[in-house]
Amino acid sequence: MKKIQVAFVLSFIIVILSSAGFASALNTSDASATVYLSSETFRPNETIAFRITFTSNTDQQIIVQRIGIHFDWMGEDVFSGKDLTSSPQTIPGYGNYTSDPIISQIPFNVSVGSHTYYVGVDGLDVSGNFTWNGPDQTLQIAYSNTGSTTPNPTPTPGGNGNQDENPPNLVPYLIIVAVAAIVIAVFVIVKELRKKPKQITPVAEKTSPPTEQPQKDNYDI
């Protein structure tokens, strides 16, 4: 009889210890997350800066140990975020926690268009360990003409899908052409002035006074 009681107690202890390591589920409605992105549209190979505000929607206390975002171009169970295990953040009932700025790199070969992401949080509540994932949200990746690869832009109705969003700046070329035209005009004017004949004022001819004829003496014959 004693052996049966000892076996029962040991089994109960094993069940308690094994269940302590399992993560409990914090319902999606028990919390919410708001993401503040540094921009509405991003380009391949750019960096994303964001903050996350995690809010408890219940009266129970929550301890946040890890918080981050999973983008759809990441591998499975990969997040970009903060590891707070060394300094967990305690959220009181109906309270919230806002993370420090988090920086994530967008791959250079990510496809152009709409992408999804969601917030993930690991922590502790009254039931023990929990893992909470928020609903999917979207962000836009726009065409970029930089980098070693050229992603295909998404064509828009009534327009050219390959149209460059950043047309070349023609102002420097126009300035060069204008300066060249001015220089040529000045050169032509100076050349014409050099060809213009000089005005010569005619000099009046000097007239010599008439030579006086010697008067002949009147001789009476």
Image: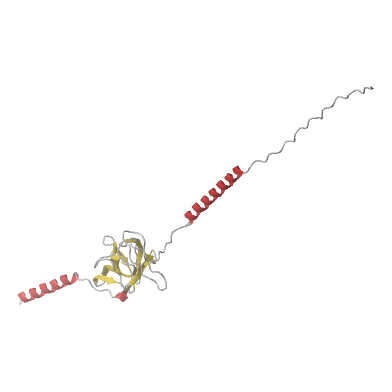
Judging depth in this view, the residue of 175 and 145 nearest the camera is 175
Can residue 32 be seen here? no
Where is 155 relative to 213, above or below? below
Percent from the top left, x then y, of residue 122?
26, 67
Image position of 124 (left or right of 9)? right
Residue extending farthest right? 220
Judging depth in this view, the residue of 55 and 80 nearest the camera is 80
Image position of 143 (left or right of 15)? right
Percent from the top left, x then y, of residue 156?
39, 71
Where is 104 relative to 198, above or below? below
Tell how many labels: 0
Q: Residue at x 60, y 43 (%)?
A: 195
Q: Quadrant of residue 105?
A: bottom left
Q: Quadrant of residue 205?
A: top right
* Colouring scheme applied when the structure was drawn: secondary structure
Give the quadrant of the C terminus.
top right
Judging depth in this view, the residue of 220 and 90 nearest the camera is 220
Where is 210 relative to 191, above or below? above
Q: Residue at x 19, y 70 (%)?
A: 20
Image position of 30 (left or right of 159)? left
Residue extending farthest bottom? 1
Judging depth in this view, the residue of 70 and 184 nearest the camera is 184
Can residue 139 be seen here? yes
Q: Quadrant of residue 167?
A: bottom left
Percent from the top left, x then y, of residue 173?
47, 54
Give the quadrant of the N terminus.
bottom left
Percent from the top left, x then y, of residue 21?
19, 69
